[in-house]
Structure formats: C-alpha cells, structure tokens
C-alpha cells in the first residue's frame, strides 16, 4: 500500500515537472480548449507572458518537490519495509538459538573427536613409553648387583625415553591449551606466534583486559590457523593482525596481501575457525575477492 501511495506521489511530482518543461514552450500549439481550461496553475494561457511566468513557477514547484519530497518518501518507504520485513525479536532469538544448537552440536562432536585423539596419542605414545621405562627400570633393579654395565645402559635408555615421553606430553597439552597462553597471556602468546610465522606479520594489540580462558584459546587458534592458511595457500608476503576489545566484545582481524579467493569448502581450516567461533556465540566474516586481499574478521563475547 505504501509503495503505491508513495509511487503515485513521486510520479505526480516528477511527471508534472517534466510535462511543464516540455509544454510551456509549446503552449501556442495546444488546442484552444486546453489553453482555455487552464494549463499552468489552473490559469488560462493567453500569451507568452502568462505561459512563461506561471509555467516557470509550476516547474520550479514540482522540481523542488521532486528533489526534496521524493527522496524523503523513498527513505520513509525503506524504513517501513525494514520494519515490516525484518525478523521480530522472537524470530531473531529463535534463529540465534538454532545457530547455537547447531554449533554446540558441532563443538560437542569436535570435542569428542579431540578427546579420542588425545586418548590415542596418550595410549599409543606416552603410555607405551612409560611402560617401556618401567620395564627397563625393573630389569635394572634385578641386574643391579650382577651386571652394573647392563644397569647403566638400561638407566640411560630409561632416561632418554622419559625425555621423549615428556616431549610428547607437551605436544598433546599444546593442542588442548597452549602453555604460552597460561604463561604470557593472549598478547604475549600472539607475539610469539607472530615471531614464529612463516611470513612477515605485523601485530596491533590493544588493551585486552581480563579474557576468559576459552575465549583466549579460540582467539589464539583462530589467528594461528589464519596465519597458517596465509602462508600455505594465499602466496602472501605480509600479514597484519589486529586484536582489540570494545566493551564485552573481542574483535580480531587478520589481513594478508595474497591472491585471495579463499574457499571454505576446499579445506578444513576456515571451517574449523567458524566452528570454534560460533560455538562461543561469536561471528566470522571472510572477505576474499579474487586477487586479494583476504580479511578474516572475528568477534567474540568476552564478558564485561
């Protein structure tokens, strides 16, 4: 209904302005009854003076209305359409709950897979080494009084296996929660990450305050994955990382100067970032036109 009414008003204003501009110079060619019936402002046209004066006034009025009123009506119409077509608060809440339900399910599946991976790593790696160490120490104890050279060899092997087991444990722990986060916080961890990056990385980290551990881990792994993708796939030579906090939101922006064209369906890196972020009710936006640059923008709730 509003489209029809506002459209008619726009056509009336613009149409009269155009019609006046065309017909005023040609008033003398109009039929006599048309001129007598009132052409400009309802006044009969009897000569050039009347035509030019009233015609010009009529054109100015309708042109002004077209310039001022039509854009205002268009804006009002747009606001009405947005108000009518936008989802209600209930619908937005339902969509958010649906998204969270899906991402929570993905997060639970990923969590289960991660636990199984950790179990396999511990069972096949660290646990096997610990069993071997225990066996060597047992043999060393039995040979302590009879064969000192065998005892020394067994103790040396046990010592080497202990160091290897500790290295494997550190790798497993690093995949769960990077120790550098606990030791140096998010800013320090990102500084170390930028130093280890395969390509030149510029960091811009604001005052982040206190951030929950889960958000820190997601932010760290998101940036690490983005830098890895840039080094492997984008042919980039430089990346820029910006991390800032605005109230209860943590914003992350990673930009590279690569060839662009990032496709989420061709690998698990971007999909993994999205799953991690959405599981914490965050948002992910990826802008990667062909030719670059690629920008990954993430926003996470981190408490007030």
Image (spheres, rainbow, N blue to C red):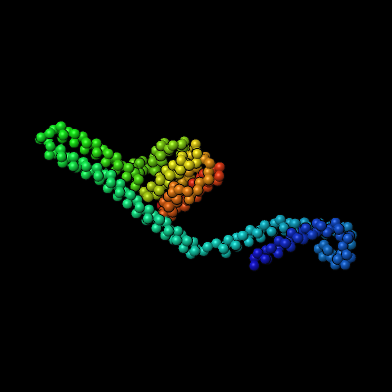
Pick the front one: 138 or 100: 138
Q: Quadrant of the N terminus?
A: bottom right
What is the quadrant of residue 207 in the picture?
top left
Of the pair 252 and 104, the residue shown nearer to us: 104
How far from the left and from the top, in percent, is residue 150? Answer: 16, 34
The residue at the point 69 percent across, 59 percent down is 70
User: Where is residue 225, by image quadrant?
Assistant: top left
Please state if 301 lies on the left or on the right of 138 as rendered.
Answer: right
As drawn, 175 above or below 106: above
Describe residue 172's horizontal placement relative to residue 3 as left or right. left
Q: For residue 105, what is the image quadrant?
A: bottom left
- What residue is drawn where x is 40% and y is 48%? 218
Q: Position of residue 78 (x, y in %)?
A: 61, 60
Question: Which residue is outermost to the top?
Answer: 149
Tally of numbered discs: 0
Viewer-proximal residue among 174 and 119: 119
Residue 84 seen by the camera: yes
Q: Please say whether residue 36 is visible from this viewpoint.
A: no
Residue at (71, 56) in percent of width and height: 67
Residue at figure coordinates x 18%, y 40% from the top left: 136
With 127 as the anchor, is 213 left or right in this view? right
- Estimate the x, y position of residue 242 in percent, counting from the top left: 47, 43
Q: Residue 109, image x and y in percent?
A: 37, 55
């Amino acid at each position: 209904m509003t489209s029809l009414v506002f459209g008619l008003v726009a056509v009336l204003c613009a149409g009269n302005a155009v019609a006046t501009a065309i017909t005023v110079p040609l008033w003398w060619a109009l039929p006599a009854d048309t001129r007598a019936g009132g052409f400009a402002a309802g006044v009969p046209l009897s000569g050039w003076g009347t035509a030019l004066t009233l015609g010009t006034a009529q054109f100015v009025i309708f042109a002004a209305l077209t310039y001022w009123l039509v854009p205002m009506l268009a804006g009002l119409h747009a606001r009405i359409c947005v108000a009518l077509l936008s989802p209600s608060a209930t619908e937005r809440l339902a969509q958010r709950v649906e998204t969270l339900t899906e991402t929570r399910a993905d997060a639970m599946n990923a969590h289960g897979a991660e636990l199984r991976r950790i179990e396999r790593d511990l069972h096949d790696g660290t646990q096997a080494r610990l069993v071997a160490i225990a066996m060597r120490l047992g043999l060393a104890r039995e040979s302590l009084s009879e064969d000192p050279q065998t005892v020394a060899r067994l103790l040396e092997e046990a010592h080497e296996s202990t160091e290897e087991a500790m290295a494997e444990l550190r790798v497993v722990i690093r995949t769960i929660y990077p120790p550098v986060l606990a030791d140096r916080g998010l800013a320090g961890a990102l500084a170390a990450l930028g130093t280890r990056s395969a390509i030149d990385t510029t960091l811009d980290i604001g005052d982040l305050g206190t951030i929950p551990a889960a958000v820190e881990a997601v932010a760290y792994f998101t940036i690490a994955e983005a830098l890895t993708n840039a080094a492997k796939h984008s042919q980039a030579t430089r990346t820029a990382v910006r991390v800032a906090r605005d109230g209860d939101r943590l914003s992350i922006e990673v930009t590279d100067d690569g060839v662009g064209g990032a496709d989420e369906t061709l690998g698990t890196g971007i999909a993994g970032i999205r799953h991690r972020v959405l599981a914490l009710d965050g948002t992910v936006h990826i802008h990667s036109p062909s030719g670059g640059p690629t920008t990954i923008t993430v926003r996470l709730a981190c408490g007030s």
